[in-house]
Image: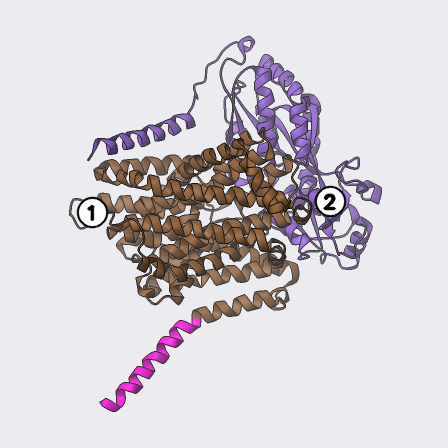
Amino acid sequence: MRPTTLRTAGGVLALAALVTAAGCADRGAVSEDAADYPSKDITLVVPYQAGGASDLAARTLAEQLEQELGTSIIVENRTGGAGSVGLQHLASAPADGYTIGYLPVETVMLGFQGYEVDPADYDLIGQMVSVPATVAVPADSPYETLGDLVEAAEKEPGKITVSNSGAGSIWEATTAALGEATGTEFKPVPFDGGAPAVTAAIGGEVDAVIAGISETAPAHADGQLRVLAVFDEQPSESLPGVPTAAEEGVDVVMGGWGGIGAPAGLPDGVKQALEEAFEVAASSEEFTAIITDSGSIPVNVPADEFASFVQSETQRFEGLLSDRG
Amino acid sequence: MSPLVEGFGSLLDPTVLLCIAAGAVLGMLVGAFPGITATMAVALASGFTLSLDPLPGLAVLLTIYVSANFGDRVPAILVNTPGTPASIATTFDGYALAKQGRAGLALTASAFASAIGTFAGLLLLMFAAIPLSRLALQFGPAEMFALVAFGLTMMVGISGGQIVKGLMAGALGLLLGAVGRDPITGDPRFTFGVLELSDGIPFIAAIIGLFGIAEVFDQILTHRTGSGPAPITQFGRWFPRRSDWRVMVKPLLVGSGVGGVVGVVPATGGDIAGILAWDQARRVSKHPEKFGKGSLEGITAADTASNATLGGSTTTSLALGIPGDSVMAVMIGSMIVWGIQPGPSLFTNNPELVYSIAGIMIVATLLALGLSLLRMRSVAKLLDLPRHFLWTVILIFCMVGTYAVNNSVFDVGVMLAFGLVGLFLRRFSVPAGPVVLGLLLGKLAESNLRRALEIGGPSNILTSPLAMAILTVSLLALLLPPLRAAWRRRRTAGAAAPTR
């Protein structure tokens, strides 16, 4: 064996060691005074894969939080179990403010779907993003309004197919809620992700799709899809001329959302510091610009308001999901 | 000025070229690191590139995408560990070639095939994007099911002559593919209360275990008795000769065709294309018996196809705004933030951007090819290490890479468990390929069939001409070879009879 080989091998081993070390960075729990917070890096747990909409919202906010808190924030994607792996990991972390996490709408849904996730396990810091549900039909569809679609479902209950991003997703729940509110039934068709669900509607495989506004608005603008209604309190700027569901006589407001939380039992001072930093970060121009460009809606809901919202959402999904097993 | 000139011309910006260079080095490294996929690298890089201008940003992301598909071939050939799922089929012949002392030829042939495949895919992007994207929209659940069913017929082909054992292995793969939540109702199946299993068996961990770890375990157990394979110290000649090129022409064509089509179909990528093309090349080859035992044709077809999917996926992504594969899903997210809206109008409103994207990928391919040819000798030198060091290096890399996919120790456990499964399969000479195929395609077949039935019942499949055509081809692919063999036997028996 020649020395160059050894050098190469040494370099490779060093690289591997470095990657390992980076993966295990700073896990030591140090109890300390809230006044010093934060005195070390903060880990932000994202329960979904890098590169998705949740990850984008979390990473964009993390950049702003870093400036506010004056420390590094390490985003850690812990995926699996429809998000419950990451959420459970967050719930079991020490409540010292050095592990925080991205809380998606699934936080209030998974508990009713056979996963061990309980919103009461988290101290809520604030909500920063909202993705209202939309219902859209293929461009050449005979249905011009949400009323037309509901009418068709009334004629043949359970025959109108509506694609969504997956079994148990918020968009499937919205389909059920739409059926419940109009006293009829749609046939949800779960796909493996939002993009294939939207594709199925563009290709005319299904009668309609229910998906987040960020997924349907681009195809609407391109003329591939026609969004019939937004399930939000007010019409969206990215969908000019598209009414809300309420304007069409269907009183359903529903959608995905995301906020920041921490394991329950944060020291008061730490929680306050996080809330203050959150408020500035979530209203920063950098954050709002990127979230708006990605098609979602940036919001800035303070902790107490977010907590009561989470409570009402939990009750709503208990009613909507429990009878479906 | 024509959009082509304008699009390519805008790449002459030094920032863009610098970004391409950075992306190429990064992509080769992450590709070669087992477990770390192009998707992950692009996802993580997209966090940084959002602050760049669109063109340099795209240059980084696209170059990682392209060059990871070169880097991942190296561990597949040298240590039987696919660097990313796209190089699963590379291991079939690549590692066999390396064991025969022809690693050098395998590495360069693979690099050339990958480059030619990428170019073939890019031709589709530049000159046939809009019509091809209409084909992509034809692929609803019924057609996807048919395509996946066609993929499943390859279990016979990749069984390496051990058909019964191969089918048993395939059944095991299908069973393992059924683990996880039901795709339609969301009910847990075979999860035994293990939360991590509710999304199914982690695929990357499983393939690294079945191929790479099983190989290491096998070598550790056999090296004392001396019954294992001799260490790879001979690389043979590096560059393909004229006679090699002649052999490679047919698989290059097969690979480009298969890869282009599979790439265009949404949500399918290089892993499926590589296996599919490998089997198709075997069918048309004059030496099908060599496939899986070190066939230059096999590795050429696999690598051409898995890289030809890049152009196909990019086409679907840009022309429809529908991700052609998981990397493109991340990239579309970034493009939207940059204010680039992929979709049919991109080609009419902004054609120069499409050419810029193709141009970036061409430069990236040339760079990755150059890097591959230049650096391969030194990377291959790692194999000169005493084997106990080499095993350690491979194990550490596989563990770190697998952990990094989901930040999950569970995945590392799955990888090691599949290493044992792979070892067991090897000892009983059961081929591992069908297990991977079952695991990869079983879930896709099931979910698309169920979806198709949900949407319109059996008639949804029966009335789709495309689905029925693909299903007929699948049936023929299963029935023809045994029938032809039987006919041939009869003919030779008949011809032999009078002389008796």
Disc 2 designates what residue?
A: A221
Residue A17 higher or lower than B279, as above or below: above
Q: CA distance from mark 2 to mark 1?
A: 63 Å
Give left or right: position of A188 versus B494. right
In the figure, the brown chain has which letter?
B
* Badge 1 amino acid: Thr
- Which segment did they paint magenta? B479-500
Question: Is label 2 in a helix, a strand or a loop?
Answer: helix
Q: How is the image coloured?
A: by chain
Q: Is residue B178 visible?
A: no
Residue B258 higher or lower than A223, as above or below: below
| Residue B107, numbered label | none
Q: Residues within 10 Å of mark 1 (few under 14, many from 20)?
A: few
* Badge 2 amino acid: Ala
Chain under label 1?
A: B
Q: Position of residue A148 (x, y in %)?
A: 81, 53
Colour given to chain A in the rendered image: purple
Q: Residue furthest left?
A: B225
Is the magenta region chiefly helix, strand or loop?
A: helix
Q: Are marks 2 and 1 in contact (CB under 8 Å)?
A: no
Q: Position of residue B239 (x, y in %)?
A: 31, 50
Q: Position of residue A290 (x, y in %)?
A: 65, 30
Residue B468 higher or lower than A203, as above or below: below
For the N terminus of chain B, the quadrant is: top right
Q: Residue furthest front?
A: B1
| Residue B222, numbered label | 1
Which of the two residues, A303 or B400, is positioned nearer the viewer here?
B400
Which of the two residues, B303 or A36, is positioned nearer the viewer here?
B303
